[in-house]
Image (tube, rainbow, N blue to C red):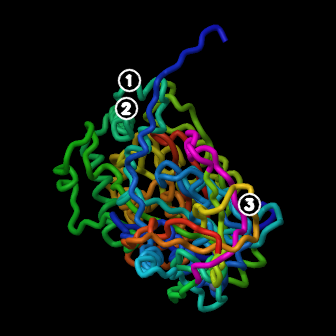
Amino acid sequence: MEETRVVQGTWDISTFKFRIEGVGLRRMLDGMKEGKLVGTRCHKCGTVYLPGPFYCRKCHIEINEPTEVSDHGEIMTYTIGYADVRGNPLDEPRIAPVVKLDGCDSWIMGVLQGVKPEDVHVGMRVKVQWAEERTGSLQDMAYYVPE
Amino acid sequence: MDINVAIVGYRMQSAPDLVTSRERLVFELTRGLFDDLGIERTDVDTTILDSNDFMDGRTISNVFIDPPAGVYMRDESKVEMDAANAVIYACMRILTGQYDTAMVVGIALTGSQASPYLYIEYTLNPTYERQVKLLNEVNAAAFQARSYIDRFGYSERLLDDIAALSLANAALNPNQARRISGITADKVAASAMYYEPLRELHCYPPTDGGCALLLASERKAKELTDKPVWIKGMGMSTETYYLGERKLYQSSSAAEAAQRAYELAGVKKPAQEIDVAEISALFAHQEPLLAEAMGLMGEGKAEQAYAAGETAIGGKLPINPSGGALGAHPVSVTGLMRVAEAARQLRGEAGDNQVKKAELAVVHGQDGVCAQQNAVLVLGI
Ligand SMILES: [Zn+2]
């Protein structure tokens, strides 16, 4: 090309609202305050979701049946991160497993502590370490530890 | 067309604020459509979702509205233009012979959760118009409106008359978002001036809305409904992006899209043969401008036609008996709503908006600044 130029542009992405269906999330957060994990079960096919959606993906019907799931489960997959989501290096490697909690069909990701990176494996049993002071926020489920 | 394709059912809703989530809107439209037809999601062979990522606030926004549309482990594709194009795409999928049913679902929460005007600002060329800071959707439309009324020596009053007629129709229609009782041309003329000659009530209202439509092959259509509405023709055309390279007082791309659709449908004299038109006129002047391009109104005849009530519900050729896009414009869903409104007319389900003889309809959708892209369908019973 004979001549190229760079023009500075902006892309303002701060102007959206997302109205969401609140029941499943509130049910989960209310439960977490009590140290429980409460999802939603489809009354037709029995699928248990956490957090619970207002409809079943498979049956295409509205669902609203609270179901408690265990805070123990099994690592289905994991990664060991050396950078945060924007690529900034972390001081310590971070183990992030995705866990199938007993009695739940969806898998929940989180951070695993109390184990060396080389000892993590798929199939490993873990449990939720609850925050000491729970406020009904996603941070209540502080991290996973080996069972 | 070798395979006949019909519209067999539809659901739509709009409001300034539907007070809902994107997912629930999609779920309720599709669940309602399935219940109307007595089918389940697995009876839908393919689904075309229509949403605009910028308006939605998420890229590849269809991934979030697939599951509530019943698209779990099913065939799906996406259109990110006005959803009249999505209807054409869905029809083409059935024409391949691979699918017997195709659903089109479009949503936009451009009334309550994102600004429609911002969207057009971001379609502008970032290295030129955005730098010049003189153009947004409404003042682009104002350039077009001025060019159009000046070309034929119309008075600005024409815009008030067009808007008053559309808004009066919209007030009768439960599917519409902007329903003003007792609307008159004087009330339109008293609304806030945006960019001359366009006032608030000459322009579409920011709207939440959605629409779901099921198409079926002839074989399947006869199983699903006794009131099929056949897609007889369809066409698309796009012109240059730059306003400065277009004759703004006319729409050559709408004319070309309509020509293609008429050819397929065997329509030779649209003004005589078409019974009803649903046109995506986002601003009052676009209705006669596009009607001229689509062969429904003679050039320079707009003042006369509106004065004589030719386009009214009881007129010679009703245009936008639904109230059109001045009643609701969920960005990118509007053309799909026009298709559904035309089907509503042809099935005789239009209630207070029903035109007397409705056997052949023409439908229009548009995209881009000043209708850069146009899609036209001919529907019949
Ligand atoms: Zn289910």
Q: Name the residue under label 1.
A: B132
Extent of the magenta region? A70-93
Q: Is mark 3 on a helix, strand or loop?
A: helix
Q: What element carries label 1?
A: helix
Q: Residues within 10 Å of mark 2 (few under 14, many from 20)?
A: some
Q: Where is residue A66 in the image (x, y as percent from the top left)?
A: 50, 87
| Residue A119: mark in rendering | 3
Q: How crowded is mark 1: few (under 14 residues within 10 Å), some or many (20 or more)?
A: few
Residue type pointed to by label 1: Val
Separation (CA) of disc 2 from disc 1: 8 Å
- Residue B359 in the image: above or below residue B378: below
Residue type pointed to by label 3: Asp
Q: Report the front residue among A55 and B215.
A: A55
Kindly indicate the quadrant of the structure image that contains residue A108: bottom right
Q: Report the front residue among B334 and A135.
A: A135
Residue sitting at 54 percent across and 65 percent down?
A143
Residue sitting at 52 percent across and 80 percent down?
A37
Tag count: 3
Residue extending farthest to the top is A2
Q: Position of residue B342 (x, y in %)?
A: 52, 67
Frontmost of labels 1 and 3 is 3
Residue type pointed to by label 2: Leu
Q: Mark 3 lies on which chain?
A: A
The CB of the residue at mark 3 lies under 8 Å from ligand 1: no
Q: Mark 2 points at which residue?
A: B135
